[in-house]
Image: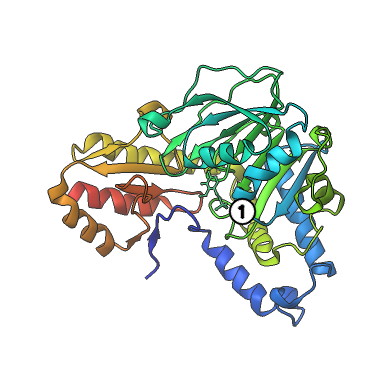
């Protein structure tokens, strides 16, 4: 029986993506060859990469001033590539928002390149809210934020207007809601939530912001090198790129981001509705910053723990345990998770 997969990532993808990926591994495009055994420079794979780059711009409604890259190294590599490519070598200074473990990871790396000012942090309240009152002026090389905090279940509902470049880690809510993507100068996201399997990271960057730092950047870490080679500077992660293309095609063919947002909003309303109704449950974060993607919550009556856990497991639910640093439970409800899975979880919560 197929499980109801609430895993935080790697996570559920559309069933069609699994089927088509499996077919391509056995016989890619009727070529008599597996996707895994062909050259990344072959005509068929170059077409995959070209379309995987083009579809992102279509979905995000971005023009030719942006470039799309598929890179290795996870979102974590971007914690270092962003400052390497954007922070000036002389008196480099960047502004960061500290909204969770991943934001803190990005801050830690940026500090190795220059001065980092933290404009707001909710660390002292265990990241239960998103700091809001701050400004980033033009003395900063860029401003960095994390749109969705995968562990704590908080999400930026609005993005600030800043007087510098705007960089965003969208790993856990990319393509989940309608956003004006053109307000960002650089967006990055590990694929393994809303986009595809682990192993590739999406970078969308405005070309004009690059090449201004005075730093000698190793080629493999230089966005301009990757752009000049159309994301084939070195052998790209071919299978994750292909599965990402399939996932984005599935999104495009099913109403695009607006339709995904409507489905995601309905799923979140159902689960938050039950958490608010049921005195046994409570979220970790303040209501106004609740994430639509990751709902982190606790059970208030320890004596019901065993009953709850055996009930959700018996109902075919998987991946509901909270992150080890926070405890409790986390329902990750990415684009591919059907409403029916949330209904199953809510029914279990009601039955306690
Ligand atoms: N940023 C966010 C918001 C994340 O959720 C994660 C991973 N879950 C990362 C960065 C790190 O991603 P990776 O494991 O791909 O390096």
| Element assignment for label 1 | helix
Q: Position of residue 292 (x, y in %)?
A: 44, 39
Q: Quadrant of the N terminus?
A: bottom left
Q: Position of residue 205 (x, y in %)?
A: 74, 39
Horizontal side, residue 231 vs residue 19: left or right: right
Of residues 308 and 151, the one drawn nearer to the viewer in this rendering: 151
> Residue at horizontal 34%, vertical 41%?
270
In the rendered image, the vertical position of residue 50 relative to residue 120, given as above or below: below
Q: Quadrant of residue 109?
A: top right
Q: Residue furthest bottom?
A: 32
In the rendered image, the vertical position of residue 241 relative to residue 282, given as above or below: below
In the rendered image, the vertical position of residue 226 relative to residue 128, given as above or below: below
Q: Quadrant of residue 289?
A: top left
Horizontal side, residue 117 vs residue 324: left or right: right
| Numbered label tally | 1
> Residue at horizontal 59%, vertical 35%?
178
Horizontal side, residue 304 vs residue 230: left or right: left
Q: Residue furthest right?
A: 228
> Residue at horizontal 42%, vertical 56%?
7
Of residues 155 and 83, the one drawn nearer to the viewer in this rendering: 83
In the rendered image, the vertical position of residue 283 relative to residue 246, given as above or below: above
Q: How is the image coloured?
A: rainbow
> Residue at horizontal 71%, vertical 73%?
35
Q: Is residue 267 visible in this depiction of the protein?
A: no
Of residues 142 and 26, the one drawn nearer to the viewer in this rendering: 142
Which residue is labeled 1 in the image?
Answer: 74
Q: Is residue 343 visible in this depiction of the protein?
A: yes
Characterize the local packing of mark 1: few (<14), some (14-19) or many (20 or more) Cα atoms within 10 angstroms: some
Q: Position of residue 122 (x, y in %)?
A: 43, 28
Question: Does the beta carbon of the residue at mark 1 sit less than 8 Å from ligand 1?
Answer: yes
């Amino acid at each position: 029986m197929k499980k109801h997969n609430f895993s935080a990532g790697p996570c559920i993808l559309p069933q069609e993506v699994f089927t088509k990926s499996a077919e391509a591994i056995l016989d890619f495009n009727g070529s008599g060859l597996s996707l895994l055994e062909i050259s990344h420079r072959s005509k068929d794979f170059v077409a995959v990469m070209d379309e995987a780059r083009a579809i992102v711009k279509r979905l995000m409604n971005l023009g030719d001033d942006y470039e799309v890259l598929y890179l290795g190294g996870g979102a974590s590599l971007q914690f270092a590539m962003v400052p390497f490519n954007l922070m000036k070598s002389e008196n480099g200074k960047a502004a960061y928002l500290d909204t969770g473990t991943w934001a803190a990871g990005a801050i830690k790396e940026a500090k190795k390149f220059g001065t980092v000012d933290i404009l707001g942090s909710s660390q002292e309240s265990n990241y239960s809210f998103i700091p809001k009152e701050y400004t980033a002026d033009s003395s900063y090389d860029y401003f960095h934020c994390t749109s969705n905090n995968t562990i704590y279940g908080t999400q930026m509902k609005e993005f600030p207007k800043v007087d510098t470049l705007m960089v965003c880690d969208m790993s856990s809510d990319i393509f989940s809601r309608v956003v004006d993507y053109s307000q960002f100068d650089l967006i990055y996201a590990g694929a393994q939530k809303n986009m595809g399997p682990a192993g590739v990271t999406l970078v969308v960057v405005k070309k004009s912001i690059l090449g201004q730092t005075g730093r000698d950047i190793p080629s493999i870490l230089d966005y301009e090198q990757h752009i000049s080679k159309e994301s084939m500077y070195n052998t790209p992660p071919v299978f994750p790129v292909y599965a990402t293309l399939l996932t984005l095609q599935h999104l495009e063919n099913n109403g695009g981001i607006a339709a995904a947002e409507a489905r995601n909003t309905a799923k979140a309303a159902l689960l938050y509705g039950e958490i608010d109704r049921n005195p046994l449950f409570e979220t970790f974060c303040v209501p106004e910053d609740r994430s639509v993607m990751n709902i982190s919550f606790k059970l208030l009556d320890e004596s019901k723990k065993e009953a709850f856990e055996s009930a959700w497991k018996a109902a075919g639910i998987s991946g509901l345990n909270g992150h080890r640093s926070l405890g409790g439970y986390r329902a990750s409800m990415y684009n591919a998770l059907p409403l029916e899975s949330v209904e199953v979880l809510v029914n279990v919560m009601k039955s306690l």
